[in-house]
Amino acid sequence: MVRPRMAEQSSLDPIPVEELQARIAAVVQPLAPRPIPLPDALGLVLAEDLVAGVALPPFANSAMDGYAARAADVAGATAQTPVRLPVVGEIGAGNAGVRRIEAGQVAKIMTGAPIPDGCDTVVPYEWTDRGVALVTITEASGPGQHVRSAGEDVRVGDRLLPVGTRLGPRQLGLAAALGQATVVAHPRPRVVVIATGSELCEPGSPLGPDSIYDANSHLIAASAEALGATARRVGIVPDDPQGFLAALHAELGEADLVVTSGGVSQGDFDVVKEALIAEGSMWFGPVAMQPGKPQGFGLIGGVPIFTLPGNPVSSYISFEVFVAPAKQGRLVQAVLGPSDGDQPA
């Protein structure tokens, strides 16, 4: 993978928006796929075909509550000429009390229960008097009627969902029906959000005479979550380079991507730029756009770092333009991988 050169601060000449987008696109790649537990996989994209390892249904079972029987034994049943047969037992779903019936016998059977050997039809309760020891049958049920055959819906080896399928409720339900506890997909990136500024305070706390509420970290975290990422707000970091670096490095081990706001312009207290210019592979400089002119991007410890300006409007627009640009969808790809498959249902 080719990485752009970002070792030094840029000149004061703004670079085109497209140039910074290209630098970002060369660095931020989809996360490597791995097995994801089903409860965590909603909205992700398959990185491996979902292939049936079991048949659905796994065994022939009853589609009705009624009596497992041989079609030949009930072929002549009508209201005028009912057929009476002995009931040799009962079969419930998950409780196969009768494994086989012989000619001239029936067994009570519930919906979903396995069809016993020797049986080729199910007579619904509605066609009987619901007898316990002896049942009267008033309508014939033909061979295979009300029986769901093994593999009728899915056969072992069927390719059910291709790579690139977006996992919605139906897809996850299918995976569970196949007995899969996990699916191989691109995981959600862990996005760490850090707001800098000694003037910031948390919403809900008293506002000082020289303070403002921190809107940016909430705005950025919500934007990342809306794209499918898992966002973590670190909280407010004052204008102190060492304090900022300590907060950043404490999070890098659990981050796939870091977004900061504030401290990247030309002021005396722009601590993000001051702290990071000598670390990793960072670029800082102006971009030919308003709002959102001051920007920074690079790698710290192999983790992509986006340093956005502190004005809330500038910060939000910068997120939309650089962190999740519509044309390239890089954060979306990091979350979901390239998707050409089904959308969630």
Image: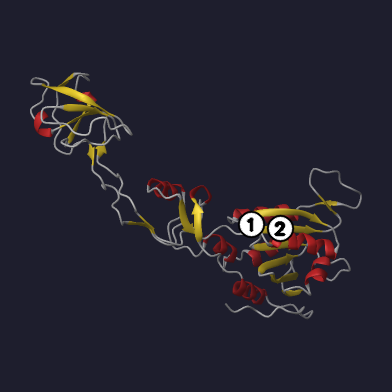
Quarter location, residue 104 = top left
Q: Nearer the viewer, residue 292 or 82?
A: 82
For mark 1, what is the residue? 224
Q: Which mark is residue 241?
A: none
Q: Is 2 situated left or right of 129 in this image?
A: right
Q: Secondary structure at mark 2?
A: strand
The residue at the point 65 percent across, 77 percent down is 19
User: Is residue 227 at all visible to an observer of this figure?
Assistant: yes
User: Quick one: label 2, few (<14), some, or many (20+) residues within 10 Å?
Assistant: many
Q: Amino acid at mark 1?
A: Ala
49 over 9 or under it: above or below: above
Task: Kindly check if marks 2 and 1 are in contact, taking CB atoms under 8 A apart as contact.
Answer: yes
Q: Secondary structure at mark 1?
A: helix
User: Is residue 311 at all visible to an observer of this figure?
Assistant: no
Q: Is 62 situated left or right of 241 in this image?
A: left
User: Quick one: label 1, few (<14), some, or many (20+) residues within 10 Å?
Assistant: many
The residue at the point 46 percent across, 55 percent down is 183
Quarter location, residue 25 = bottom right
Q: Nearer the viewer, residue 75 or 285?
A: 75
For mark 2, what is the residue? 193
Quarter location, residue 102 = top left
Query: What's the distance in space between the residues labelled 2 and 1, CA to CA?
Result: 9 Å
Numbered disc in front, either 2 or 1: 2
> Where is residue 272 shown, x and y percent of the image?
80, 66
The residue at the point 79 percent across, 61 percent down is 246
Q: Amino acid at mark 2?
A: Val
> Where is residue 134 shown, x and y percent of the image?
17, 19
Task: Identify the image quadrant of the N terminus.
Answer: bottom right
77 over 309 or under it: above or below: above
> Where is residue 172 shown, x and y percent of the image?
44, 49
The residue at the point 9 percent across, 33 percent down is 72
Task: Give whichever of discs 2 and 1 has the lower sequence position.
Answer: 2
